[in-house]
Protein backbone atom coordinates (compact mmCIF):
# COMPACT_ATOMS: atom_id res chain seq x y z
CA UNK A 1 0.00 0.00 0.00
CA UNK A 2 1.30 3.49 -0.80
CA UNK A 3 2.10 5.97 1.97
CA UNK A 4 -0.93 8.05 0.99
CA UNK A 5 -3.01 4.92 1.16
CA UNK A 6 -1.66 4.13 4.62
CA UNK A 7 -2.47 7.64 5.77
CA UNK A 8 -6.02 7.20 4.53
CA UNK A 9 -6.31 3.80 6.19
CA UNK A 10 -5.01 5.17 9.48
CA UNK A 11 -7.86 7.66 9.53
CA UNK A 12 -10.49 4.93 9.49
CA UNK A 13 -9.13 2.63 12.17
CA UNK A 14 -11.88 1.03 14.27
CA UNK A 15 -14.21 1.07 11.29
CA UNK A 16 -14.92 4.79 11.41
CA UNK A 17 -15.48 5.73 7.78
CA UNK A 18 -14.05 9.09 6.79
CA UNK A 19 -15.80 9.19 3.42
CA UNK A 20 -19.23 10.75 3.53
CA UNK A 21 -20.71 12.44 6.58
CA UNK A 22 -22.78 10.10 8.70
CA UNK A 23 -25.19 11.59 11.21
CA UNK A 24 -23.51 12.33 14.50
CA UNK A 25 -20.57 10.10 13.61
CA UNK A 26 -17.48 9.92 15.83
CA UNK A 27 -14.08 9.79 14.14
CA UNK A 28 -10.79 8.66 15.67
CA UNK A 29 -8.03 10.44 13.73
CA UNK A 30 -4.40 9.52 14.28
CA UNK A 31 -1.54 11.94 13.69
CA UNK A 32 -0.04 12.15 10.23
CA UNK A 33 3.41 10.67 9.66
CA UNK A 34 4.72 14.18 9.00
CA UNK A 35 4.58 15.05 12.72
CA UNK A 36 7.85 16.58 13.90
CA UNK A 37 9.63 18.51 16.58
CA UNK A 38 11.13 21.87 15.66
CA UNK A 39 14.52 22.82 17.09
CA UNK A 40 15.66 26.42 17.47
CA UNK A 41 18.95 27.64 18.97
CA UNK A 42 18.65 31.34 19.74
CA UNK A 43 22.36 31.56 20.59
CA UNK A 44 23.75 29.81 17.52
CA UNK A 45 21.04 31.04 15.17
CA UNK A 46 20.35 27.48 14.01
CA UNK A 47 16.84 26.15 13.42
CA UNK A 48 15.39 23.15 11.67
CA UNK A 49 12.46 20.73 11.56
CA UNK A 50 13.43 17.26 12.79
CA UNK A 51 11.51 14.48 11.08
CA UNK A 52 14.19 11.82 10.72
CA UNK A 53 14.49 10.22 14.16
CA UNK A 54 11.47 7.91 13.73
CA UNK A 55 11.40 7.37 17.45
CA UNK A 56 10.45 10.41 19.52
CA UNK A 57 9.74 14.10 19.72
CA UNK A 58 10.89 16.45 22.46
CA UNK A 59 9.53 19.59 24.10
CA UNK A 60 11.85 21.79 26.14
CA UNK A 61 15.48 22.82 26.13
CA UNK A 62 18.03 20.14 25.28
CA UNK A 63 21.47 20.28 23.67
CA UNK A 64 21.22 24.04 23.24
CA UNK A 65 17.97 23.75 21.27
CA UNK A 66 14.53 24.87 22.36
CA UNK A 67 12.05 22.34 21.00
CA UNK A 68 8.31 22.07 20.38
CA UNK A 69 6.24 19.23 18.92
CA UNK A 70 3.80 19.81 16.02
CA UNK A 71 1.22 17.20 14.95
CA UNK A 72 -0.87 17.33 11.74
CA UNK A 73 -4.31 15.66 11.59
CA UNK A 74 -6.39 15.04 8.46
CA UNK A 75 -9.92 16.42 8.73
CA UNK A 76 -12.94 14.19 8.07
CA UNK A 77 -15.57 14.84 5.44
CA UNK A 78 -18.29 17.26 6.50
CA UNK A 79 -21.73 17.81 5.03
CA UNK A 80 -22.71 21.43 4.32
CA UNK A 81 -23.33 23.18 7.62
CA UNK A 82 -21.97 20.29 9.67
CA UNK A 83 -19.81 21.15 12.69
CA UNK A 84 -17.67 19.56 15.37
CA UNK A 85 -19.86 18.87 18.39
CA UNK A 86 -17.23 17.47 20.75
CA UNK A 87 -13.54 16.70 20.60
CA UNK A 88 -10.66 15.34 22.63
CA UNK A 89 -6.92 14.98 22.09
CA UNK A 90 -4.35 12.70 23.66
CA UNK A 91 -0.65 12.09 23.19
CA UNK A 92 1.60 9.22 24.22
CA UNK A 93 4.25 10.47 26.63
CA UNK A 94 7.44 8.44 26.88
CA UNK A 95 8.78 10.53 29.79
CA UNK A 96 7.88 13.79 31.49
CA UNK A 97 11.13 15.34 32.68
CA UNK A 98 10.58 19.09 32.48
CA UNK A 99 10.25 21.34 35.51
CA UNK A 100 7.85 23.52 33.53
CA UNK A 101 4.36 23.03 32.18
CA UNK A 102 3.57 22.72 28.46
CA UNK A 103 0.70 24.34 26.56
CA UNK A 104 -1.43 22.92 23.75
CA UNK A 105 -2.05 25.22 20.76
CA UNK A 106 -3.90 24.92 17.47
CA UNK A 107 -2.35 26.36 14.30
CA UNK A 108 -3.99 27.46 11.07
CA UNK A 109 -5.13 24.69 8.74
CA UNK A 110 -3.23 23.89 5.55
CA UNK A 111 -3.73 21.66 2.52
CA UNK A 112 -0.53 19.68 3.19
CA UNK A 113 0.67 18.01 6.43
CA UNK A 114 4.19 19.46 6.24
CA UNK A 115 5.42 21.00 9.50
CA UNK A 116 7.04 24.41 8.95
CA UNK A 117 9.77 26.29 10.80
CA UNK A 118 7.27 29.09 11.32
CA UNK A 119 5.18 26.69 13.45
CA UNK A 120 7.83 26.89 16.20
CA UNK A 121 7.11 28.58 19.50
CA UNK A 122 8.40 28.35 23.04
CA UNK A 123 7.38 30.52 25.95
CA UNK A 124 4.37 31.84 27.75
CA UNK A 125 1.23 32.91 25.92
CA UNK A 126 1.73 32.94 22.13
CA UNK A 127 0.25 36.23 20.93
CA UNK A 128 0.45 35.39 17.22
CA UNK A 129 -2.45 33.76 15.37
CA UNK A 130 -2.01 30.46 17.27
CA UNK A 131 -5.10 29.27 19.17
CA UNK A 132 -4.66 28.38 22.84
CA UNK A 133 -6.48 25.07 23.17
CA UNK A 134 -5.40 24.26 26.73
CA UNK A 135 -3.01 26.13 28.97
CA UNK A 136 -0.82 23.88 31.14
CA UNK A 137 -1.87 20.84 29.12
CA UNK A 138 1.05 18.89 30.57
CA UNK A 139 2.12 19.36 34.19
CA UNK A 140 5.54 20.21 35.49
CA UNK A 141 6.79 16.80 36.56
CA UNK A 142 10.11 15.12 37.29
CA UNK A 143 8.79 11.87 35.84
CA UNK A 144 5.75 10.32 34.21
CA UNK A 145 4.62 8.41 31.16
CA UNK A 146 1.47 7.14 29.45
CA UNK A 147 -1.33 8.87 27.55
CA UNK A 148 -2.16 12.42 28.52
CA UNK A 149 -5.35 14.00 27.23
CA UNK A 150 -7.31 17.23 27.18
CA UNK A 151 -9.44 18.21 30.15
CA UNK A 152 -13.11 19.15 29.80
CA UNK A 153 -12.06 22.79 29.32
CA UNK A 154 -9.41 21.68 26.82
CA UNK A 155 -12.06 19.74 24.89
CA UNK A 156 -14.17 22.88 24.65
CA UNK A 157 -11.14 24.82 23.44
CA UNK A 158 -10.44 22.12 20.87
CA UNK A 159 -14.01 22.28 19.53
CA UNK A 160 -13.80 26.06 19.20
CA UNK A 161 -10.45 25.80 17.39
CA UNK A 162 -11.60 23.08 14.98
CA UNK A 163 -14.82 24.88 14.09
CA UNK A 164 -12.84 28.08 13.50
CA UNK A 165 -10.71 26.17 10.99
CA UNK A 166 -13.85 24.84 9.27
CA UNK A 167 -15.19 28.41 9.09
CA UNK A 168 -11.86 29.43 7.53
CA UNK A 169 -12.32 26.90 4.72
CA UNK A 170 -10.86 23.68 6.12
CA UNK A 171 -12.55 20.43 5.17
CA UNK A 172 -11.88 16.94 3.89
CA UNK A 173 -8.34 16.79 2.53
CA UNK A 174 -7.18 19.63 4.77
CA UNK A 175 -4.96 19.34 7.83
CA UNK A 176 -5.16 20.97 11.24
CA UNK A 177 -2.05 21.25 13.40
CA UNK A 178 -1.74 20.89 17.17
CA UNK A 179 1.43 22.05 18.92
CA UNK A 180 2.82 21.26 22.35
CA UNK A 181 5.31 23.89 23.52
CA UNK A 182 7.15 24.83 26.71
CA UNK A 183 5.30 27.42 28.80
CA UNK A 184 8.41 29.29 29.97
CA UNK A 185 10.42 32.12 28.44
CA UNK A 186 14.16 31.63 27.88
CA UNK A 187 14.31 28.36 29.79
CA UNK A 188 17.74 27.37 31.16
CA UNK A 189 16.28 23.95 31.96
CA UNK A 190 18.05 20.99 30.36
CA UNK A 191 15.22 18.61 31.12
CA UNK A 192 12.67 17.82 28.40
CA UNK A 193 9.45 15.93 27.80
CA UNK A 194 9.69 12.99 25.40
CA UNK A 195 6.80 11.88 23.19
CA UNK A 196 6.06 8.86 21.06
CA UNK A 197 5.04 9.89 17.56
CA UNK A 198 2.84 8.90 14.64
CA UNK A 199 6.03 8.53 12.62
CA UNK A 200 7.21 5.95 15.16
CA UNK A 201 4.10 3.86 14.49
CA UNK A 202 4.65 3.99 10.72
CA UNK A 203 8.36 3.28 11.14
CA UNK A 204 7.68 0.16 13.20
CA UNK A 205 4.99 -0.99 10.77
CA UNK A 206 7.49 -0.64 7.92
CA UNK A 207 9.73 -3.12 9.73
CA UNK A 208 7.24 -5.39 11.49
CA UNK A 209 4.47 -5.50 8.89
CA UNK A 210 1.73 -3.12 7.80
CA UNK A 211 -0.94 -5.36 9.36
CA UNK A 212 0.28 -4.07 12.73
CA UNK A 213 -0.18 -0.39 11.83
CA UNK A 214 -3.62 0.05 13.47
CA UNK A 215 -2.43 -1.28 16.84
CA UNK A 216 0.84 0.66 16.58
CA UNK A 217 -1.02 3.90 15.92
CA UNK A 218 -3.29 3.21 18.88
CA UNK A 219 -0.26 2.65 21.08
CA UNK A 220 2.07 5.42 19.93
CA UNK A 221 0.38 8.08 17.81
CA UNK A 222 -1.18 11.34 18.93
CA UNK A 223 -4.94 10.91 18.72
CA UNK A 224 -7.78 13.29 17.92
CA UNK A 225 -11.37 12.12 18.51
CA UNK A 226 -14.18 14.25 17.09
CA UNK A 227 -17.93 13.84 17.04
CA UNK A 228 -19.82 15.68 14.32
CA UNK A 229 -23.17 17.38 14.62
CA UNK A 230 -25.97 15.72 12.72
CA UNK A 231 -25.95 16.57 9.05
CA UNK A 232 -28.88 18.70 7.96
CA UNK A 233 -31.60 16.99 5.98
CA UNK A 234 -31.13 17.59 2.23
CA UNK A 235 -33.14 20.51 0.92
CA UNK A 236 -34.55 19.74 -2.55
CA UNK A 237 -34.82 23.42 -3.46
CA UNK A 238 -31.12 24.07 -2.73
CA UNK A 239 -30.33 23.24 -6.35
CA UNK A 240 -26.84 24.74 -6.36
CA UNK A 241 -25.84 23.13 -3.03
CA UNK A 242 -24.97 26.44 -1.39
CA UNK A 243 -26.70 25.59 1.88
CA UNK A 244 -29.55 28.06 1.35
CA UNK A 245 -32.42 28.73 -1.06
CA UNK A 246 -32.43 31.89 -3.16
CA UNK A 247 -32.83 33.14 -6.70
CA UNK A 248 -29.57 31.46 -7.72
CA UNK A 249 -31.19 28.07 -7.19
CA UNK A 250 -34.14 29.08 -9.37
CA UNK A 251 -31.90 30.32 -12.16
CA UNK A 252 -29.71 27.20 -11.93
CA UNK A 253 -32.72 24.90 -12.17
CA UNK A 254 -34.26 26.80 -15.08
CA UNK A 255 -30.97 26.60 -16.94
CA UNK A 256 -30.79 22.85 -16.39
CA UNK A 257 -34.46 22.48 -17.33
CA UNK A 258 -34.07 24.36 -20.60
CA UNK A 259 -31.07 22.20 -21.45
CA UNK A 260 -32.95 19.03 -20.51
CA UNK A 261 -30.08 18.13 -18.17
CA UNK A 262 -30.40 14.96 -16.12
CA UNK A 263 -30.23 16.89 -12.85
CA UNK A 264 -33.45 18.71 -13.83
CA UNK A 265 -35.36 15.41 -13.45
CA UNK A 266 -36.69 16.71 -10.15
CA UNK A 267 -39.30 14.02 -9.61
CA UNK A 268 -36.98 11.17 -10.58
CA UNK A 269 -39.29 9.92 -13.32
CA UNK A 270 -36.45 9.36 -15.78
CA UNK A 271 -37.42 12.25 -18.05
CA UNK A 272 -37.47 16.05 -17.85
CA UNK A 273 -40.88 17.64 -18.37
CA UNK A 274 -43.32 20.17 -16.95
CA UNK A 275 -43.90 18.01 -13.87
CA UNK A 276 -40.28 18.60 -12.85
CA UNK A 277 -40.70 22.33 -13.28
CA UNK A 278 -43.87 22.37 -11.18
CA UNK A 279 -42.26 20.16 -8.55
CA UNK A 280 -39.22 22.38 -8.22
CA UNK A 281 -41.28 25.58 -8.07
CA UNK A 282 -43.34 24.09 -5.24
CA UNK A 283 -40.20 23.17 -3.32
CA UNK A 284 -38.69 26.58 -4.03
CA UNK A 285 -41.75 28.35 -2.58
CA UNK A 286 -41.56 26.12 0.52
CA UNK A 287 -37.86 26.83 1.04
CA UNK A 288 -35.82 24.89 3.59
CA UNK A 289 -36.35 24.46 7.30
CA UNK A 290 -33.62 26.01 9.43
Image: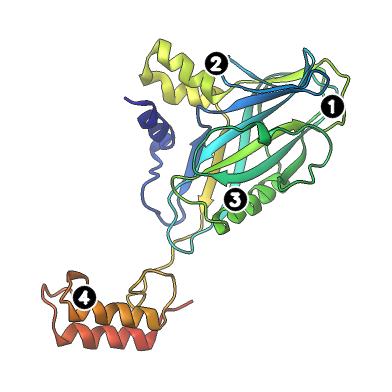
The alpha-carbon separation of the residues under discs 1 and 2 comes to 25 Å
Other residues around mark 4 within 10 Å, as few (<14) / some (14–19) / many (≥20): many
Mark drawn on residue 162: 3
| Badge 3 vs badge 1, beta-carbon distance below 8 Å | no
> On the rendered structure, is 272 left or right of 34?
left
The alpha-carbon separation of the residues under discs 2 and 4 comes to 54 Å
Q: Report the mark closest to the observer, 3 or 4.
A: 4
Looking at the rendered structure, the secondary structure element under dot 4 is helix
The alpha-carbon separation of the residues under discs 4 and 1 comes to 63 Å
Q: How is the image coloured?
A: rainbow
Residue carrying label 2: 54
Looking at the rendered structure, the secondary structure element under dot 1 is loop
Q: Report the mark closest to the observer, 4 or 1.
A: 4
Residue carrying label 4: 264
Circle nearer the N terminus (2, 4): 2
Front residue (pair 217, 122): 122
Residue displayed at 18% across by 75% down:
265
Residue carrying label 1: 100
| Badge 2 vs badge 4, beta-carbon distance below 8 Å | no
Circle nearer the N terminus (3, 1): 1
Quarter of the picture containing the N terminus is top left
Amino acid sequence: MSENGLRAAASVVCGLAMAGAALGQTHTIYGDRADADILVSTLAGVQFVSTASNTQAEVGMNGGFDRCYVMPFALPALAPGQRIASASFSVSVAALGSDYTSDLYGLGWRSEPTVLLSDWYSGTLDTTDAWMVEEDFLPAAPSGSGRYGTSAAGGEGLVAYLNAQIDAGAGEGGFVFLRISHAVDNSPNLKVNFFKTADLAYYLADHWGQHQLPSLLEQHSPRLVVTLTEAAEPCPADFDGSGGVNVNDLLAFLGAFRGQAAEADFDGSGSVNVNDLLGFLGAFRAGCEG
